[in-house]
Each structure stands twice: as C-alpha cells, then as structure tokens.
Amino acid sequence: MGIFRNGALALLVAGAVAAPTGVEAQVQIDEENTGIGTAAAEFLLLGAGARGMALGPSYAALVRDVESTYYNPAGLPLMEGPEAAFTMMSYFADTDYVWAGFALPLGNGEFGMGVNIGSFGFSDATVFSEEDPDGEEGLRYDVRETAIGLSFAHAFIDRFTGGLTLKYISDQLGTAEANGFAVDVGTNFHTEWNGRPIALAFVIQNLGSTMRHSGAGLDFEELPDENGEIPVTAVDPFAARFLASEFSLPIAFRVGVSYDVLSTDANRLSLLGQFSEVSNINQPGFGFAGEYEWTPVDMPLAVALRGGYDFQSDNSFNDQEADEFEGAYDTDNGDGMDGLTLGGGLEYALGDFGLGFDYAFRHFGVLGSRNVFSVSFGW
C-alpha cells in the first residue's frame, strides 16, 4: 500500500507543478514545429522494389523478402531462401532512381543478413552560366546521391525478430559532395489471430549524422563590396570557400500492422495499415494498403494485385494558401491523387529457382505519376 500511496502523491505533486497558475501561464503555439524542408538526402525515402512501393510504408509489417533490407531488417530471418532484386524508376526532371539488393536467411531462420544500394540523380548534364548561357564550352556535371546498406537480423523467439541496417550515404552535387552515416532499426512481432497470420512492426530509419557539403564547387574568388551586392575581384585574387550549413537526415518513425483476412493454399488477402512521421519533411501521416495473391494449385506461378493510399499533408492547403498557389500548379493533377499507389506482380517457379516481375504505379501529387519496375531472383 505504501508504494501506491507514494505513487499517488507523486502524481498529485507533478500535476500541481504542471498546472498553470493563471491565464498568463497558458501559452498557445500556432506555428508548426516540423522543421519542414531542413533535411538532406531525401532520396532515402523513395522506397525499394515495386512491391514495396505499391504497398507503401505499411509493407514494413508484411515484408519477408530482400526488400527487408530497406523497409524492415527484422524481416530477414523470415525469408524462405536467398533472393536478389533490382528496381528502376524514372523520376522527374530527367532524373532516375535505381535500387538493388541481396539477402538470405541463416541458421534455419535464426539469423538473416543482406546488402542493398540505392542511387538517385542524373549524369553528364551541360553547365550553363552567366558567362556561357548556351553551354558552348562543353562543360558537364553530375548529380548523384547514393546509399549503401548492410543489414543484420536475429529471431529472438519464434514470434519476434529484430534487425538493423548500417548505411553509408554519399551526396555528390557537381564538384561539391557530402558524406554521412545512418542506421535503421526494426522489429517484427508475428502471431495468429482467429487462425490467420497477423504481424506488428516498428521501424526507425535514417537515424545518424548530419551532412555538410564541401569541395571545389564552393570555391570563389570574387568578393562582395561593402553593400554586399556587386561582386568585385581583388587585385591579387585568392581562392576562398563557402562554409555550407549542416543538414540532418530525414529520420522516419513508422508503426505498421498486417493481417491476412483470407489465408488458404491458393488465396491470400492481406490488409495493412501504418502510422508514420518523417522529421524535417512533413507532418505525421497514416495509410492503408492491401495485397491479394492467387497461387493456383499444382501450377508453378503466383499472381498478385496491390494497392494503397497514404494520407499526407504536403498538398493540403487552407483557403488562403490555395488562392496563393492557384495557377502555380495544376489542381486537376494535384493533391487528390497524392499518395495513391497501385501495382501487381507475377512469380514463376522453376524447381527450386523463382523468377519474379513486379510493377507499381505511384502518384506524387502536383508532380504527377511514375511507373516502377522490378525483377527478382530467388533460390
């Protein structure tokens, strides 16, 4: 009884300290405190694999393949065998995103490991400048962001797995570059409810260092005048370098659940849901997804249909903001479909070898839509 009495007294004291003593003590913060637009290496959020991109972040609870190295490393011990995959998505403004991975379970499903690489950007673009507006000098530059991950996972008990992915991140912007390190941590609890599989997942992604660009691209020889407006050149010019600011990585917190509402030898229907928040990018959001898989009896193939929708705030404007943005973007192609994902897949088995093809359709709001293609090999 003494423990409960002391605990109640502590709660009363804490409440008295936290309670406002008057109207003046109440503070209402109207501004958002999300740090939107202050993150580096946002390509880390583009996803991996057409299957995962069609299901969105909810896939963290269902993933049992090589895409675990991206969505949730805790899925690695649950793989049926080794698997390799390659994904390509043509992004906007002549950029591209590619992702590849390899993973395998170890120790009869007690452990798992894998490696993946993701790359985003463009190459061999013409340099235009004030002195050379037509690019006649023939100078070229590349922009390429790359992340390499090494994943490890362990099945602590038959219903709970955990894992982590160590990442090296490189961001090359012409002749300036930045490097960083990060870690993903994921867990997966899986059991049965009403005789059908259910899984819960918690994932933290991109927890790591800040990134600061440096290199020849930040060098300069012209100095501003006293008013800081018109550049002037010193009599004896000397090279100086701008000191770039540091930016944190887009840290993502995700909680997901998956449940097989239909689970037979030939048919499976999985429903998924997730809550997520990405610091420095956006406000918290949530989403739903579903996957139907048909595996005909005595046939070496499987067909899947997928779809999902993530509710996001990046294109949600109030009346005043909508008026300000009117004409700046196509509202018919805007926020109504933002977060919509669709897709499907086909897997064919040749003995112990499996070949898979997957497709995903992703809508990025005012930017438009993109197609994603993946191929996978399992054995």
Image (cartoon, rainbow, N blue to C red):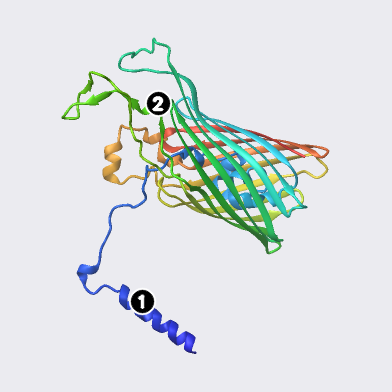
Type of amino acid under label 1: Ala
| Label 1: how many Cα within 10 Å (few below 14, some 14–19, many 20+) | few
Of pointers 2 and 1, the one earlier in the residue sequence: 1
Q: Are marks 2 and 1 in contact (CB under 8 Å)?
A: no
* Horizontal side of residue 16 vs 59, given as left or right: left
Quadrant position of residue 36: top left
Quadrant position of residue 201: bottom right
**Image mark for residue 14:** 1
| Label 2: how many Cα within 10 Å (few below 14, some 14–19, many 20+) | some
* Horizontal side of residue 210 vs 30, given as left or right: right
Give SS at disc 2. helix
Give SS at disc 1. helix
Type of amino acid under label 2: Ala
Q: Position of residue 159 (x, y in %)?
A: 68, 61
Q: Residue most toward the bottom?
A: 1
Q: Nearer the viewer, mark 2 or mark 1?
A: 2
Q: Position of residue 284 (x, y in %)?
A: 43, 52
Name the residue tied to disc 2: 216
Above or below — where is 328 with respect to 307? Answer: above
**Image mark for residue 83:** none
- Quarter holding the C terminus is top right
Q: Nearer the viewer, residue 135 or 22?
A: 135
* Horizontal side of residue 172 vs 298, given as left or right: left
Quadrant position of residue 176: top left
**Residue for point 39% across, 10% down:** 136
